[in-house]
Image (cartoon, rainbow, N blue to C red):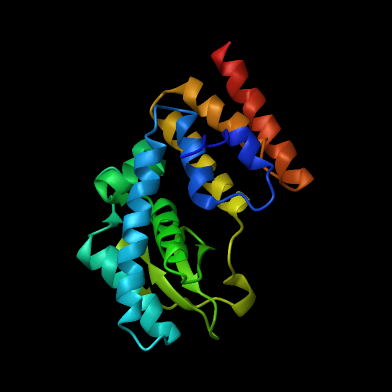
Amino acid sequence: MPRIPSFAELAVAPGAALDLLALALAAEFRDVDAVGAIATLDVLGAELARAAGRTSGAPDELALACGQLLGVTHRFVGDREEYDHPDNSMLDVVLSRRRGLPILLSVVYVEVARRAGIPLAGVGLPGHFVVGYFGVVPPLLLDPFAGGEAVEVDLAQDAVHPWSTSAIAMRILNNLVMAYQRRGDLGAAIRAASMRLALPAERSLRVEHQTELRAMQARLN
């Protein structure tokens, strides 16, 4: 397998793959077996492709096949005991433990589905993160944190939309900034905050992140 580019490289690369970006993000904090993580996603993707082949191909059946395989058969669910632990934001660890934050479990769903030819996308909601199949109206939503259950949300149609890879990475880093600060690991929080500046963002958000980073750096000094 060729070298996985660094987070800094992938953060500005058009069309960067979500799995590679999430693994590169995790590798900024700890050693990561990226080859093993990709292999796990490939195996799950092949399983899902076989399961999808046993459906009629209808959108609801394809989406629910994802939830059945990952949430029921392989028991990927949310970590309710240590919800904000940094490990729950690391894709390789989530794949190994089958526990994680909603957004990382959604990354698993999106990447496994992509390998099976099923177009799932991450969807940010107020205080939560799910995945959606946008080939139908309204989109079909699954909650990976709840084991892949189908969900309905009471939001305006334009509020439920696919998130970009960079937006997902930004939210993961936001979670890590807060998680590390709560644990008193200011150095790791500063690293996560610095990484946010590598991602595309509106000027007002970039200024906000720069201000927060300088405040953390001042505390460290």
Count the marks.
0
User: Which residue is rendered at x = 35% and y = 38% of the image?
Assistant: 87
In the foreground, 32 or 35: 35
Q: In which quarter of the image is the C terminus?
A: top right
Q: Quadrant of residue 163?
A: bottom right
- On screen, 11 above or below 217? below
User: Which residue is rendered at x = 35% and y = 48% of the image?
Assistant: 39
Question: Is residue 220 shown left or right of residue 76?
Answer: right
Q: Residue furthest front?
A: 1
Q: Can residue 88 be seen in this view?
A: no
User: Which residue is rendered at x = 52% and y = 34% of the image?
Assistant: 3
User: Which residue is rendered at x = 48% and y = 25% of the image?
Assistant: 188
Q: Position of residue 150 (x, y in %)?
A: 36, 76
Q: Quadrant of residue 21?
A: top right
In the foreground, 210 or 115: 115
Question: Is residue 131 shown left or right of residue 202?
Answer: left
- On screen, 199 above or below 185? below
Q: Where is residue 20 in the image (x, y as percent from the top left)?
A: 51, 45
Q: Position of residue 180 (x, y in %)?
A: 44, 30
Q: Which residue lies furthest to the right in this view?
A: 203
In the foreground, 153 or 123: 123
Question: Is residue 138 shown left or right of residue 57?
Answer: right
Q: Where is residue 38 in the image (x, y as percent from the top left)?
A: 40, 47
Q: Is residue 152 visible?
A: yes
